[in-house]
Image (spheres, rainbow, N blue to C red):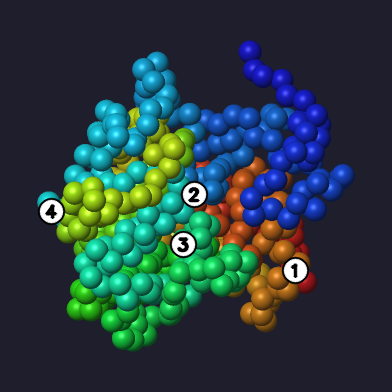
Protein backbone atom coordinates (compact mmCIF):
# COMPACT_ATOMS: atom_id res chain seq x y z
CA UNK A 1 0.00 0.00 0.00
CA UNK A 2 1.45 3.33 -1.06
CA UNK A 3 1.58 6.37 1.19
CA UNK A 4 -0.95 9.13 0.63
CA UNK A 5 0.36 12.68 1.06
CA UNK A 6 -1.46 15.95 1.60
CA UNK A 7 0.75 18.09 -0.63
CA UNK A 8 -1.04 21.37 0.13
CA UNK A 9 -0.69 20.91 3.88
CA UNK A 10 2.99 19.99 3.55
CA UNK A 11 3.63 23.07 1.43
CA UNK A 12 1.95 25.35 3.99
CA UNK A 13 4.03 23.96 6.85
CA UNK A 14 7.23 24.14 4.82
CA UNK A 15 6.67 27.80 3.92
CA UNK A 16 5.79 28.60 7.52
CA UNK A 17 8.87 27.09 9.14
CA UNK A 18 11.73 25.99 6.83
CA UNK A 19 14.66 27.95 5.43
CA UNK A 20 16.12 26.26 2.34
CA UNK A 21 19.77 26.57 1.28
CA UNK A 22 20.70 28.51 -1.87
CA UNK A 23 17.02 29.39 -2.31
CA UNK A 24 15.46 32.87 -2.78
CA UNK A 25 12.93 32.46 0.00
CA UNK A 26 10.65 35.32 -1.05
CA UNK A 27 9.89 33.44 -4.27
CA UNK A 28 9.66 30.13 -2.43
CA UNK A 29 7.12 31.44 0.07
CA UNK A 30 4.98 33.18 -2.58
CA UNK A 31 1.36 32.08 -2.46
CA UNK A 32 1.39 30.82 -6.06
CA UNK A 33 4.57 28.75 -5.65
CA UNK A 34 3.99 25.01 -5.30
CA UNK A 35 7.00 23.33 -3.64
CA UNK A 36 8.16 20.03 -5.06
CA UNK A 37 7.71 17.43 -2.31
CA UNK A 38 9.84 14.35 -2.98
CA UNK A 39 8.75 11.20 -1.18
CA UNK A 40 10.25 8.14 -2.84
CA UNK A 41 13.20 6.97 -4.93
CA UNK A 42 14.12 3.88 -6.90
CA UNK A 43 17.20 3.56 -9.08
CA UNK A 44 17.79 6.74 -11.05
CA UNK A 45 14.20 7.92 -10.46
CA UNK A 46 12.41 10.03 -7.86
CA UNK A 47 8.70 10.38 -7.14
CA UNK A 48 6.84 13.37 -5.72
CA UNK A 49 3.86 13.52 -3.38
CA UNK A 50 1.47 13.64 -6.35
CA UNK A 51 2.86 10.41 -7.84
CA UNK A 52 4.85 12.05 -10.66
CA UNK A 53 8.20 10.42 -11.55
CA UNK A 54 11.41 12.23 -12.49
CA UNK A 55 14.85 11.16 -13.64
CA UNK A 56 17.29 12.41 -10.99
CA UNK A 57 19.38 14.47 -13.39
CA UNK A 58 21.74 15.96 -10.82
CA UNK A 59 21.99 12.96 -8.48
CA UNK A 60 20.27 14.86 -5.66
CA UNK A 61 22.93 17.60 -5.60
CA UNK A 62 25.71 15.39 -6.95
CA UNK A 63 25.52 12.81 -4.16
CA UNK A 64 23.76 9.70 -5.45
CA UNK A 65 25.99 7.11 -7.08
CA UNK A 66 24.24 3.73 -7.38
CA UNK A 67 20.63 4.87 -7.50
CA UNK A 68 18.07 5.44 -4.78
CA UNK A 69 17.08 2.66 -2.40
CA UNK A 70 19.87 0.33 -3.47
CA UNK A 71 19.23 -2.91 -1.54
CA UNK A 72 22.87 -3.49 -0.56
CA UNK A 73 23.25 -0.08 1.06
CA UNK A 74 19.80 -0.22 2.64
CA UNK A 75 20.63 -3.63 4.11
CA UNK A 76 23.97 -2.44 5.50
CA UNK A 77 22.33 0.54 7.19
CA UNK A 78 19.57 -1.62 8.70
CA UNK A 79 22.03 -4.21 9.99
CA UNK A 80 24.15 -1.52 11.62
CA UNK A 81 21.03 0.17 13.02
CA UNK A 82 20.23 -3.07 14.83
CA UNK A 83 23.65 -2.87 16.52
CA UNK A 84 24.04 0.85 17.31
CA UNK A 85 23.18 4.02 15.39
CA UNK A 86 25.87 6.31 16.76
CA UNK A 87 28.80 6.25 19.16
CA UNK A 88 31.43 8.84 19.97
CA UNK A 89 34.55 8.90 17.82
CA UNK A 90 36.40 10.92 20.46
CA UNK A 91 38.37 8.36 22.43
CA UNK A 92 36.50 5.39 20.92
CA UNK A 93 36.14 3.70 17.57
CA UNK A 94 33.78 1.34 15.74
CA UNK A 95 34.09 -1.47 13.16
CA UNK A 96 32.42 0.31 10.18
CA UNK A 97 34.75 3.31 10.51
CA UNK A 98 37.79 1.02 10.68
CA UNK A 99 36.62 -0.94 7.62
CA UNK A 100 35.97 2.24 5.67
CA UNK A 101 39.41 3.68 6.40
CA UNK A 102 41.00 0.44 5.22
CA UNK A 103 38.99 0.53 1.99
CA UNK A 104 39.87 4.14 1.28
CA UNK A 105 43.63 3.86 1.74
CA UNK A 106 43.75 0.60 -0.24
CA UNK A 107 42.95 2.52 -3.41
CA UNK A 108 46.23 4.42 -3.34
CA UNK A 109 49.86 3.31 -3.65
CA UNK A 110 51.43 2.01 -0.42
CA UNK A 111 52.92 4.62 1.87
CA UNK A 112 51.05 7.54 0.25
CA UNK A 113 47.61 8.37 1.65
CA UNK A 114 47.60 6.31 4.84
CA UNK A 115 45.49 8.34 7.29
CA UNK A 116 41.75 9.05 7.25
CA UNK A 117 39.99 11.80 9.19
CA UNK A 118 36.20 11.45 9.18
CA UNK A 119 33.74 14.35 9.36
CA UNK A 120 30.30 15.30 8.05
CA UNK A 121 30.28 16.92 4.59
CA UNK A 122 32.41 18.37 1.82
CA UNK A 123 32.96 21.70 3.54
CA UNK A 124 34.29 20.04 6.67
CA UNK A 125 36.50 17.69 4.65
CA UNK A 126 38.15 20.74 3.07
CA UNK A 127 38.18 22.64 6.36
CA UNK A 128 39.99 19.76 8.06
CA UNK A 129 42.63 19.65 5.32
CA UNK A 130 43.24 23.39 5.59
CA UNK A 131 43.54 23.29 9.38
CA UNK A 132 45.86 20.30 9.24
CA UNK A 133 48.07 22.10 6.71
CA UNK A 134 48.29 25.27 8.83
CA UNK A 135 48.95 23.41 12.09
CA UNK A 136 51.57 21.23 10.38
CA UNK A 137 53.51 24.37 9.42
CA UNK A 138 53.32 25.66 12.98
CA UNK A 139 54.55 22.36 14.38
CA UNK A 140 57.39 22.29 11.86
CA UNK A 141 58.60 25.77 12.76
CA UNK A 142 57.18 27.50 9.67
CA UNK A 143 54.58 29.82 11.24
CA UNK A 144 54.65 32.33 8.36
CA UNK A 145 53.46 29.73 5.83
CA UNK A 146 49.77 30.45 6.33
CA UNK A 147 48.62 31.37 2.83
CA UNK A 148 46.59 29.31 0.38
CA UNK A 149 46.42 29.40 -3.39
CA UNK A 150 43.10 28.58 -5.02
CA UNK A 151 41.54 29.10 -8.43
CA UNK A 152 39.15 31.69 -9.77
CA UNK A 153 35.52 30.51 -9.90
CA UNK A 154 36.30 27.67 -7.48
CA UNK A 155 33.83 26.44 -4.88
CA UNK A 156 35.02 24.35 -1.94
CA UNK A 157 32.21 24.68 0.60
CA UNK A 158 30.58 27.10 3.01
CA UNK A 159 32.39 26.74 6.33
CA UNK A 160 34.62 29.73 6.98
CA UNK A 161 37.90 28.21 5.85
CA UNK A 162 36.39 26.52 2.81
CA UNK A 163 34.57 29.73 1.87
CA UNK A 164 37.87 31.61 2.13
CA UNK A 165 39.32 29.77 -0.84
CA UNK A 166 36.16 29.99 -2.93
CA UNK A 167 36.40 32.12 -6.05
CA UNK A 168 32.68 32.80 -6.62
CA UNK A 169 31.72 36.20 -5.25
CA UNK A 170 28.17 35.35 -4.23
CA UNK A 171 29.52 32.72 -1.83
CA UNK A 172 32.57 34.43 -0.32
CA UNK A 173 31.63 38.13 -0.32
CA UNK A 174 29.40 37.82 2.78
CA UNK A 175 32.41 36.65 4.84
CA UNK A 176 34.98 39.04 3.33
CA UNK A 177 37.33 40.25 6.02
CA UNK A 178 36.87 37.11 8.10
CA UNK A 179 38.77 34.67 5.90
CA UNK A 180 42.10 32.88 5.62
CA UNK A 181 44.76 34.54 3.42
CA UNK A 182 44.30 33.32 -0.15
CA UNK A 183 45.63 34.15 -3.59
CA UNK A 184 43.38 33.23 -6.51
CA UNK A 185 44.86 32.32 -9.86
CA UNK A 186 43.65 30.98 -13.22
CA UNK A 187 46.64 28.86 -14.26
CA UNK A 188 49.45 26.99 -12.44
CA UNK A 189 51.95 29.13 -14.33
CA UNK A 190 50.62 32.08 -12.29
CA UNK A 191 51.65 30.57 -8.95
CA UNK A 192 54.45 33.06 -8.29
CA UNK A 193 56.58 32.97 -5.09
CA UNK A 194 55.32 30.42 -2.61
CA UNK A 195 57.55 30.92 0.44
CA UNK A 196 54.51 32.03 2.50
CA UNK A 197 52.13 29.43 1.03
CA UNK A 198 51.10 26.29 2.87
CA UNK A 199 48.90 24.65 0.20
CA UNK A 200 47.29 24.85 -3.22
CA UNK A 201 43.65 23.72 -3.47
CA UNK A 202 41.89 22.54 -6.63
CA UNK A 203 39.02 20.40 -7.89
CA UNK A 204 40.81 17.95 -10.20
CA UNK A 205 39.82 17.62 -13.88
CA UNK A 206 36.71 19.80 -13.68
CA UNK A 207 35.31 22.74 -11.69
CA UNK A 208 31.74 22.12 -10.61
CA UNK A 209 30.07 25.30 -9.38
CA UNK A 210 31.98 27.29 -12.00
CA UNK A 211 29.62 25.80 -14.57
CA UNK A 212 31.06 22.32 -15.12
CA UNK A 213 34.30 23.55 -16.70
CA UNK A 214 36.98 20.91 -17.40
CA UNK A 215 40.62 21.75 -16.85
CA UNK A 216 43.08 21.33 -19.75
CA UNK A 217 44.70 17.86 -19.83
CA UNK A 218 47.95 17.77 -17.92
CA UNK A 219 47.18 20.73 -15.66
CA UNK A 220 46.87 18.60 -12.53
CA UNK A 221 50.17 16.81 -13.18
CA UNK A 222 51.89 20.15 -13.78
CA UNK A 223 50.46 21.53 -10.56
CA UNK A 224 51.69 18.52 -8.58
CA UNK A 225 55.21 19.05 -9.92
CA UNK A 226 55.21 22.75 -9.04
CA UNK A 227 53.97 22.04 -5.51
CA UNK A 228 56.69 19.43 -5.04
CA UNK A 229 59.37 21.84 -6.23
CA UNK A 230 58.20 24.54 -3.79
CA UNK A 231 57.53 22.26 -0.81
CA UNK A 232 53.84 23.19 -0.87
CA UNK A 233 50.97 20.84 -0.07
CA UNK A 234 48.47 19.90 -2.78
CA UNK A 235 44.88 19.61 -1.52
CA UNK A 236 42.49 17.93 -3.94
CA UNK A 237 38.78 18.57 -3.46
CA UNK A 238 37.14 15.45 -4.89
CA UNK A 239 33.85 16.04 -3.13
CA UNK A 240 32.12 16.22 -6.53
CA UNK A 241 34.57 14.33 -8.76
CA UNK A 242 35.12 11.29 -6.57
CA UNK A 243 33.52 7.85 -6.81
CA UNK A 244 33.34 7.31 -10.55
CA UNK A 245 31.92 10.62 -11.74
CA UNK A 246 34.84 11.26 -14.10
CA UNK A 247 35.15 7.64 -15.25
CA UNK A 248 37.70 6.51 -12.64
CA UNK A 249 37.11 6.02 -8.94
CA UNK A 250 39.01 9.23 -8.22
CA UNK A 251 39.69 11.96 -10.78
CA UNK A 252 43.35 12.29 -9.76
CA UNK A 253 44.02 8.77 -11.04
CA UNK A 254 43.68 10.00 -14.63
CA UNK A 255 46.87 12.06 -14.34
CA UNK A 256 48.63 9.68 -11.95
CA UNK A 257 48.63 12.28 -9.17
CA UNK A 258 48.54 11.53 -5.45
CA UNK A 259 47.82 14.63 -3.35
CA UNK A 260 48.95 15.47 0.16
CA UNK A 261 45.31 15.81 1.21
CA UNK A 262 42.28 14.25 -0.52
CA UNK A 263 38.82 15.56 0.44
CA UNK A 264 35.81 13.29 -0.10
CA UNK A 265 32.09 13.50 0.67
CA UNK A 266 28.85 13.53 -1.41
CA UNK A 267 29.09 10.10 -3.09
CA UNK A 268 31.06 8.52 -0.24
CA UNK A 269 27.96 6.77 1.16
CA UNK A 270 26.40 6.29 -2.26
CA UNK A 271 24.32 9.38 -1.57
CA UNK A 272 22.45 8.03 1.44
CA UNK A 273 23.88 9.62 4.59
CA UNK A 274 26.10 12.59 5.46
CA UNK A 275 29.76 11.56 5.74
CA UNK A 276 33.09 13.00 4.68
CA UNK A 277 36.71 11.94 4.73
CA UNK A 278 40.02 13.77 4.57
CA UNK A 279 42.91 11.52 3.59
CA UNK A 280 46.52 12.52 4.21
CA UNK A 281 50.02 11.13 4.47
CA UNK A 282 52.02 9.58 7.26
CA UNK A 283 54.43 12.52 6.93
CA UNK A 284 51.65 14.93 7.91
CA UNK A 285 50.23 12.64 10.60
CA UNK A 286 53.56 12.14 12.38
CA UNK A 287 54.00 15.88 12.87
CA UNK A 288 51.00 15.76 15.23
CA UNK A 289 52.47 13.02 17.44
CA UNK A 290 53.95 13.85 20.81
CA UNK A 291 53.22 13.89 24.54
CA UNK A 292 50.04 15.65 25.55
CA UNK A 293 51.87 18.63 27.04
CA UNK A 294 53.59 19.29 23.69
CA UNK A 295 50.25 20.57 22.33
CA UNK A 296 50.37 18.65 19.05
CA UNK A 297 46.82 17.29 19.15
CA UNK A 298 44.55 18.15 16.22
CA UNK A 299 41.67 19.84 18.02
CA UNK A 300 39.01 19.68 15.35
CA UNK A 301 36.03 17.37 14.89
CA UNK A 302 32.28 16.91 14.98
CA UNK A 303 29.76 15.11 17.13
CA UNK A 304 28.89 12.71 14.31
CA UNK A 305 32.45 12.08 13.09
CA UNK A 306 32.88 8.38 12.32
CA UNK A 307 29.12 7.75 12.49
CA UNK A 308 28.65 3.96 12.18
CA UNK A 309 25.57 4.18 9.95
CA UNK A 310 27.30 6.42 7.42
CA UNK A 311 30.47 4.33 7.48
CA UNK A 312 28.47 1.11 6.98
CA UNK A 313 26.76 2.69 3.98
CA UNK A 314 30.12 3.76 2.55
CA UNK A 315 31.59 0.26 2.90
CA UNK A 316 28.51 -1.14 1.16
CA UNK A 317 28.99 1.37 -1.64
CA UNK A 318 32.55 0.12 -2.17
CA UNK A 319 31.14 -3.43 -2.32
CA UNK A 320 28.74 -2.35 -5.06
CA UNK A 321 31.58 -0.85 -7.10
CA UNK A 322 33.29 -4.25 -6.91
CA UNK A 323 30.34 -6.62 -7.20
CA UNK A 324 28.48 -4.77 -9.96
CA UNK A 325 31.65 -3.76 -11.83
CA UNK A 326 30.43 -0.18 -11.86
CA UNK A 327 33.56 1.43 -13.26
CA UNK A 328 33.73 -1.11 -16.09
CA UNK A 329 30.16 -0.20 -17.09
CA UNK A 330 30.91 3.51 -17.50
CA UNK A 331 32.79 3.85 -20.86
CA UNK A 332 29.75 3.14 -23.11
CA UNK A 333 27.59 5.49 -21.03
CA UNK A 334 30.21 8.23 -21.20
CA UNK A 335 30.44 7.76 -24.96
CA UNK A 336 26.66 7.85 -25.30
CA UNK A 337 26.48 11.06 -23.28
CA UNK A 338 29.15 12.61 -25.51
CA UNK A 339 27.04 11.83 -28.60
CA UNK A 340 23.91 13.22 -26.96
CA UNK A 341 25.65 16.45 -26.01
CA UNK A 342 26.90 16.81 -29.58
CA UNK A 343 23.29 16.62 -30.77
CA UNK A 344 22.34 19.38 -28.33
CA UNK A 345 25.07 21.67 -29.66
CA UNK A 346 23.13 22.36 -32.85
CA UNK A 347 20.09 23.70 -30.97
CA UNK A 348 19.35 27.42 -30.87
CA UNK A 349 20.56 29.07 -27.65
CA UNK A 350 22.96 26.22 -26.77
CA UNK A 351 26.25 28.09 -26.55
CA UNK A 352 28.47 25.23 -25.38
CA UNK A 353 28.34 21.75 -23.91
CA UNK A 354 31.04 20.52 -21.51
CA UNK A 355 31.70 17.00 -20.28
CA UNK A 356 33.99 15.04 -17.99
CA UNK A 357 32.90 11.43 -17.58
CA UNK A 358 29.24 11.41 -16.57
CA UNK A 359 29.37 15.08 -15.60
CA UNK A 360 27.92 17.50 -18.13
CA UNK A 361 27.05 21.17 -18.40
CA UNK A 362 24.88 22.71 -21.13
CA UNK A 363 25.34 26.48 -21.28
CA UNK A 364 22.62 28.60 -22.89
CA UNK A 365 23.15 32.11 -24.24
CA UNK A 366 21.58 34.52 -26.68
CA UNK A 367 22.04 33.75 -30.41
CA UNK A 368 24.80 36.39 -30.65
CA UNK A 369 26.76 34.60 -27.92
CA UNK A 370 26.10 37.15 -25.19
CA UNK A 371 24.85 35.93 -21.80
CA UNK A 372 21.26 36.37 -20.75
CA UNK A 373 20.84 38.97 -17.98
CA UNK A 374 21.66 37.16 -14.75
CA UNK A 375 18.53 38.39 -12.98
CA UNK A 376 16.27 36.75 -15.58
CA UNK A 377 17.34 33.35 -14.20
CA UNK A 378 17.09 31.69 -17.61
CA UNK A 379 18.79 28.49 -16.46
CA UNK A 380 16.40 28.22 -13.53
CA UNK A 381 13.41 28.62 -15.87
CA UNK A 382 14.72 25.85 -18.13
CA UNK A 383 15.12 23.49 -15.19
CA UNK A 384 11.55 24.20 -14.06
CA UNK A 385 10.37 23.44 -17.59
CA UNK A 386 12.36 20.19 -17.57
CA UNK A 387 10.19 18.94 -14.70
CA UNK A 388 7.23 18.88 -17.06
CA UNK A 389 9.25 16.49 -19.20
CA UNK A 390 10.18 14.22 -16.30
CA UNK A 391 13.65 15.48 -15.39
CA UNK A 392 14.94 17.02 -12.15
CA UNK A 393 18.10 19.08 -12.21
CA UNK A 394 19.47 22.47 -11.18
CA UNK A 395 21.50 25.06 -13.08
CA UNK A 396 24.72 26.88 -12.32
CA UNK A 397 23.51 30.29 -13.50
CA UNK A 398 22.67 29.54 -17.16
CA UNK A 399 24.52 26.24 -17.36
CA UNK A 400 22.15 23.29 -17.05
CA UNK A 401 23.80 20.51 -15.03
CA UNK A 402 23.29 16.91 -16.09
CA UNK A 403 24.97 14.48 -13.68
CA UNK A 404 22.75 11.44 -13.15
CA UNK A 405 23.59 8.46 -10.92
CA UNK A 406 26.17 6.05 -12.33
CA UNK A 407 23.48 3.36 -12.56
CA UNK A 408 21.60 5.38 -15.18
CA UNK A 409 21.11 3.35 -18.39
CA UNK A 410 21.88 4.61 -21.89
CA UNK A 411 18.14 4.79 -22.53
CA UNK A 412 17.70 6.95 -19.43
CA UNK A 413 20.54 9.19 -20.62
CA UNK A 414 18.59 9.60 -23.87
CA UNK A 415 15.50 10.52 -21.86
CA UNK A 416 17.32 13.10 -19.76
CA UNK A 417 18.97 14.92 -22.64
CA UNK A 418 15.70 14.88 -24.61
CA UNK A 419 14.01 16.51 -21.61
CA UNK A 420 16.65 19.26 -21.53
CA UNK A 421 16.23 19.86 -25.27
CA UNK A 422 12.46 20.08 -24.86
CA UNK A 423 12.77 22.42 -21.86
CA UNK A 424 15.09 24.77 -23.78
CA UNK A 425 12.57 24.80 -26.62
CA UNK A 426 9.71 25.55 -24.20
CA UNK A 427 11.60 28.34 -22.44
CA UNK A 428 13.42 29.93 -25.38
CA UNK A 429 11.30 29.35 -28.49
CA UNK A 430 13.35 29.98 -31.64
CA UNK A 431 12.67 33.34 -33.28
Q: Residues within 10 Å of mark 1 (few under 14, many from 20)?
A: few
Q: Quadrant of residue 188?
A: bottom left
Q: Residues within 10 Å of mark 3 (few under 14, many from 20)?
A: many
Please report whichever mark, 4 or 3, sits nearer to the chain's N-terminal start.
Answer: 4
Label 4 secondary element: loop
Q: Give yes or no for contact between labels 2 and 1 (Cβ–Cβ under 8 Å).
A: no
Q: Which residue is mark 1?
A: 375
Q: Which residue is mark 4?
A: 111
Q: Residues within 10 Å of mark 4 (few under 14, many from 20)?
A: few
Q: Which residue is mark 2?
A: 62
Q: Which label lies toward us, 4 or 3?
A: 3
Q: Which label lies toward us, 1 or 3?
A: 3
In the shown orientation, is residue 111 left or right of residue 179?
left
Q: Which residue is mark 3?
A: 161
Q: Give yes or no for contact between labels 4 and 2 (Cβ–Cβ under 8 Å).
A: no
Distance Cα–Cα, label 2 vs label 1? 25 Å
Instruction: Identify the residue shown where x is 26% and y is 73%.
Output: 142
Amino acid sequence: MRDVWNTAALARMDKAHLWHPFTPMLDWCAEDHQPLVLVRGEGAWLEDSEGRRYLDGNSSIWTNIHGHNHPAITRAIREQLDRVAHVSFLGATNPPAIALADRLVSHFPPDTLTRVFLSDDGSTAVEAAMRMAIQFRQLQGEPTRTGFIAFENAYHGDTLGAASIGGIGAFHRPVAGHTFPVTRITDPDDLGPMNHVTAVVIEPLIQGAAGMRPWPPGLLRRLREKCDAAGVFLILDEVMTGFGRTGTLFACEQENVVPDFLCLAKGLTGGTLPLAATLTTEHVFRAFLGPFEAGRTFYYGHSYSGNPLGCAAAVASFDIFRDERVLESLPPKISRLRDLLASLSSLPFVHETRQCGLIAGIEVRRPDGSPFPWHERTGHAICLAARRHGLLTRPVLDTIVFMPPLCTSEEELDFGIAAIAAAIGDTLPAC
